[in-house]
Image: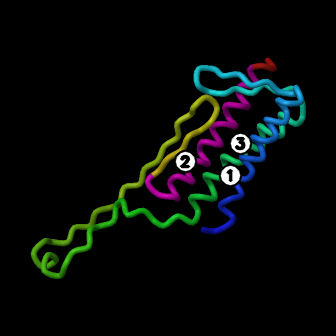
Amino acid sequence: MRPIRFVGPGILLTGLVALAWAVARGEASVYLIFVVPAVVGTGPLAFLGILLVFLGFFLTFFLWTTGAPPSAIGRPPIESPETEAIAPQETTKARRWGGVVFLGPIPLVFGSDPQMTRMMLILGVILFFALLLLTVALLLS
């Protein structure tokens, strides 16, 4: 396992420590809404913690999918020479799929292979920032 893969979880952990420190100093408050924790911060340490948590999630998903072995989904089964002579050759195209689900403002991504998951992650980040810009524009108008 390559050491670069631990950058994302390390940044995520650093962000959580910064948020805990901000709560201890009184710069942030933590609330539990249904089962989702919410953080309200007033200081720069709280902002830094939230920023590092988002960056840690992004880097973890991005770096853990770059070196993954290709998926066996969609590969034709290995056949013996006897079955090749009996069955006609059919070319089946491998299906690739992926998706983005938003849990509040956080995109959860999934896909059939690392490239599709990475594409869905990029789409989720773009949609997150579009949602953020629309929300800020609505609040300022």
Identify the element where label 1 is drawn: helix
Does 132 appear in magenta?
yes
Q: CA distance from mark 1 to mark 2?
A: 20 Å
Instruction: Provide the residue designation for mark 1.
Output: 9
Quadrant location of the C terminus? Answer: top right
Please provide the residue range marked out in magenta. Answer: 112-138
Where does residue 72 sit, x and y in percent of width and height? 38, 63
Instruction: Provide the residue designation for mark 3.
Output: 54
Instruction: Provide the residue designation for mark 2.
Output: 120
Q: Can you tell which of label 1 and label 2 is closer to the viewer?
A: 1
Where does residue 17 sit, x and y in percent of width and height? 78, 41
Q: CA distance from mark 2 to mark 3?
A: 16 Å
Point out the residue furthest to the front here: 24
127 sits to left or right of 48: left
Q: Amino acid at mark 1?
A: Pro
Q: Amino acid at mark 2?
A: Met
- Crowding near pointer 1: few (<14 within 10 Å), some, many (20+)? some
Q: Main secondary structure of the magenta part?
A: helix
10 sits to left or right of 23: left
